[in-house]
Image (cartoon, rainbow, N blue to C red):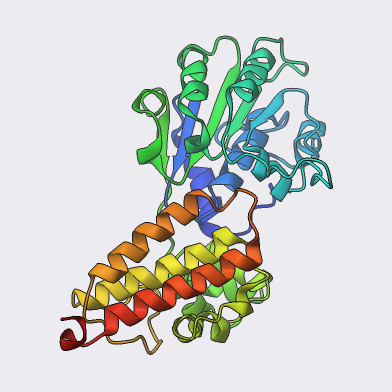
């Protein structure tokens, strides 16, 4: 039995990484929403498998494979932001007490714990492995603290890092890793796989997600239907985003950024990238949309902090409506 990796492009990336590996540190790099995290999981399982042939995947049957699957292997450690751990169900959600949300960063204390783990002798003798995802979540202090061990790991220590934004990594981190590029699957393959997962209208949903397959899958599993997503421009024109009250701030801002991108593209004469089959308003002025895009970027940076979501939802709706109105006004109306 092989590791549970569903998308075929994830399977291919894992096989490629195991066949071309020449370094103790592999960096799986590619666009967002492809499954880099799953590739790292597969690498860690393969490196710790006690029955694996060279270059092959983990057997999935040995004791080590079962321990990795249960996250109880004594020679495997993860560097993940606290927010990721909570989202994966690895840590309980805090109830009551502090209102602070789990961090989106990998912090220095977490790196120090990983370094302490790295210095101990392997319990089962095969290897010690550390998975890092997303690698760009390491703040500068944390990344610098990892550099020496990343360059000279010693013993049988190995690193599997994943990134959706390689340009945000410190060059010194990238230079110490062997990069394995993960490309976008063909739209037909991606849509076929989404349909196998029960996603309705997969081609259109995939286009709206910008080709990010796992994002489209997450939208579908959250109960978002294509009609609701495509109605976003009309809802915004009416300053009514109540249909999105169950979304997280980050999710809604991401959708608004996609809409803003397409509207700016229309003003410049380009076809829409995300809202392909949607009746978008006729844009006459880019400046209001550029200001809105800047405001959305700032909002995204604050989206994980405690907020009065109902009030912020209303504010986002009003701001978006005003940007649309200003961008679509005839020239004589702005004079």
Asked whether residue 57 appears in the rendered view, the answer is: no
The quadrant of the rendering that contains the C terminus is bottom left
The answer to whether residue 306 is above or below residue 79 is: below
Q: Nearer the viewer, residue 22 or 299?
A: 299
Q: Position of residue 46 (x, y in %)?
A: 64, 35
Give the left or right position of residue 230, taking residue 118 as reference. left
Give the left or right position of residue 137, taking residue 52 as reference. left
The answer to whether residue 12 is above or below residue 325 is: above
Give the left or right position of residue 160, taking residue 165 as reference. right
Q: Position of residue 139 (x, y in %)?
A: 49, 30
At x 51% / y 57%, what residue is drawn? 33
At x 58% / y 27%, what residue is drawn? 107
Give the left or right position of residue 96, taking residue 1 as reference. right
Q: Position of residue 267 (x, y in %)?
A: 22, 77
The answer to whether residue 34 is above or below residue 202 is: above
At x 49% / y 47%, what residue is drawn? 13
The answer to whether residue 262 is above or below residue 329 is: above
Task: Give the total number of marks visible in the rendering.
Answer: 0
Q: Nearer the viewer, residue 180 or 254?
A: 254
Q: Nearer the viewer, residue 317 or 76?
A: 317
Asked whether residue 234 appears in the rendered view, the answer is: yes
At x 48% / y 79%, what residue is drawn? 203
Residue placed farthest to the front in the image?
335
Report which quarter residue 287 is drawn in: bottom left
Q: Position of residue 59 (x, y in %)?
A: 71, 40
Q: Nearer the viewer, residue 255 or 198?
A: 255
Report which quarter residue 285 is drawn in: bottom left
Report which quarter residue 283 is drawn in: bottom left
């Amino acid at each position: 039995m092989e590791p549970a990796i569903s998308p075929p492009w994830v399977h291919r990336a894992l096989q490629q990484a195991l066949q071309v590996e020449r370094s103790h540190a592999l960096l799986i790099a590619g666009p967002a929403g492809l499954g880099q995290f799953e590739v790292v999981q597969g690498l860690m399982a393969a490196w710790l498998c006690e029955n694996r042939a060279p270059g092959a995947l983990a057997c999935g049957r040995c004791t080590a494979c079962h321990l990795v699957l249960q996250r109880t292997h004594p020679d495997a450690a993860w560097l993940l932001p606290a927010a990721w751990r909570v989202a994966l169900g690895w840590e309980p959600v805090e109830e009551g007490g502090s209102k602070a949300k789990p961090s989106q960063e990998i912090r220095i204390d977490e790196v120090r714990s990983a370094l302490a783990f790295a210095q101990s002798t392997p319990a089962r003798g095969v290897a010690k492995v550390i998975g890092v995802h997303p690698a760009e979540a390491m703040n500068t202090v944390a990344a610098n603290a990892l550099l020496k061990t990343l360059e000279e790991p010693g013993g049988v220590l190995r690193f599997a890092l994943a990134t959706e934004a390689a340009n945000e990594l410190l060059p010194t981190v990238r230079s110490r890793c062997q990069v394995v590029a993960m490309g976008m699957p063909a739209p037909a393959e991606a849509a076929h796989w989404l349909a196998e997962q029960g996603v309705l209208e997969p081609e259109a949903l995939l286009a709206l997600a910008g080709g990010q397959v796992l994002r489209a899958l997450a939208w579908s599993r959250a109960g978002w239907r294509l009609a609701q997503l495509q109605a976003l421009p009309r809802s915004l024109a009416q300053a009514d985003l109540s249909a999105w009250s169950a979304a997280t701030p980050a999710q809604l801002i991401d959708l608004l950024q996609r809409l803003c991108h397409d509207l700016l593209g229309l003003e410049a004469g380009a076809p829409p990238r995300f809202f392909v089959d949607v009746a978008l308003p006729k844009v006459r002025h880019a400046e209001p949309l550029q200001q809105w895009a800047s405001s959305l970027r700032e909002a995204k940076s604050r989206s994980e902090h405690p907020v009065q979501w109902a009030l912020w939802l209303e504010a986002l709706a009003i701001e978006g409506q005003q940007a649309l109105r200003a961008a679509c006004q005839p020239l004589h109306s702005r004079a």
